Amino acid sequence: EAQVTQNPRYLITVTGKKLTVTCSQNMNHEYMSWYRQDPGLGLRQIYYSMNVEVTDKGDVPEGYKVSRKEKRNFPLILESPSPNQTSLYFCASGTYRDTLGYTFGSGTRLTVV
Amino acid sequence: KNQVEQSPQSLIILEGKNCTLQCNYTVSPFSNLRWYKQDTGRGPVSLTIMTFSENTKSNGRYTATLDADTKQSSLHITASQLSDSASYICVVSESGTASKLTFGTGTRLQVTL
């Protein structure tokens, strides 16, 4: 089944403790992206990647890192999480020409206390 | 600044009734417009995607329209079902690649008995 898999689905952590949210897709998509979704706001892009070893900042990159060492994986790294990073995170993938729309993962609900 | 505005913010309708959701955008240059359905706590799922030259596109009981001149789109849901209860998000792509999307904040639809 074609899908984007995020792990974990839920995560509670403490301020300053490094964490990684994994994202993997099995559709051979070139493009992958991370978003966060907060109440009353639309999805906001954190980072995106056009292909392996090619990443760029989105609208809200502060406090996040990403890497794209393999085509299928695009982990999101929070080196020193803070409470304002408490949010619902989504990974998405798509083709370069984006003719079919994105495929989104099921989301990761992160709480930083 | 590119913006996507959706109305209404929320809507309650009786099962079996029709409804229309609106999307206005200022994104330029325009590439395509998508409608996504997002169940609570889940990732968005693509309903339709329309390019500049397409005026209407259907997906089952969902019909999207696009007026690129007035920069407006609508999503019409026919014979609503309880399972249509979700948020509907309008997303506009700025360029010919997958990299830059602007998300609306969504319309929350509740279908009741």
Image (cartoon, coloured by chain):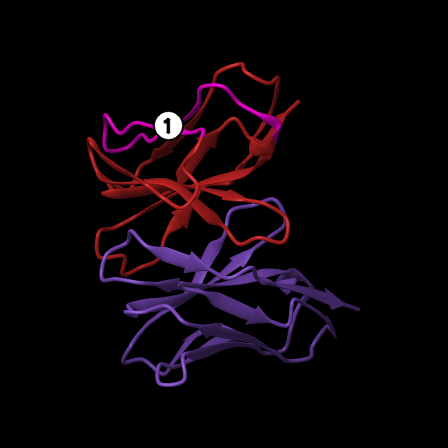
Q: Quadrant of residue A66?
A: top left
| Magenta region, residue range | A63-83
Rendered residue at 40%/46% (across/down) = A59
Q: Position of residue A10 (x, y in %)?
A: 59, 28
Q: Colour of chain A?
A: red
Amino acid type indicated by mark 1: Lys
Q: How many marks?
A: 1
Quadrant location of the N terminus of chain B?
bottom left
Above or below for B46 versus A86? below
Rendered residue at 56%/59% (across/down) = B105
Q: Position of residue A6 (x, y in %)?
A: 45, 32
Q: Is residue A39 visible?
A: yes
Q: Is residue A75 visible?
A: no
Q: Position of residue B80 (x, y in %)?
A: 64, 73
Chain under numbered label 1: A
Magenta stretch, main secondary structure class: loop
Q: Quadrant of residue A84?
A: top right
Quadrant location of the C terminus of chain B?
bottom right
Q: Nearer the viewer, residue A26 or A86?
A: A86
> Farthest residue in the right direction?
B113
Above or below for A15 versus B104? above
* Left or right: where A24 falls relative to B7: left
> Farthest residue in the front direction?
B1
Q: Which residue is mark 1?
A: A65
Decide whether residue A81 is among the magenta residues. yes
* Left or right: where B62 falls relative to A2: right
What SS does tag 1 mark?
strand
Rendered residue at 66%/68% (across/down) = B81
Rendered residue at 26%/29% (across/down) = A68
Q: Colour of chain B?
A: purple
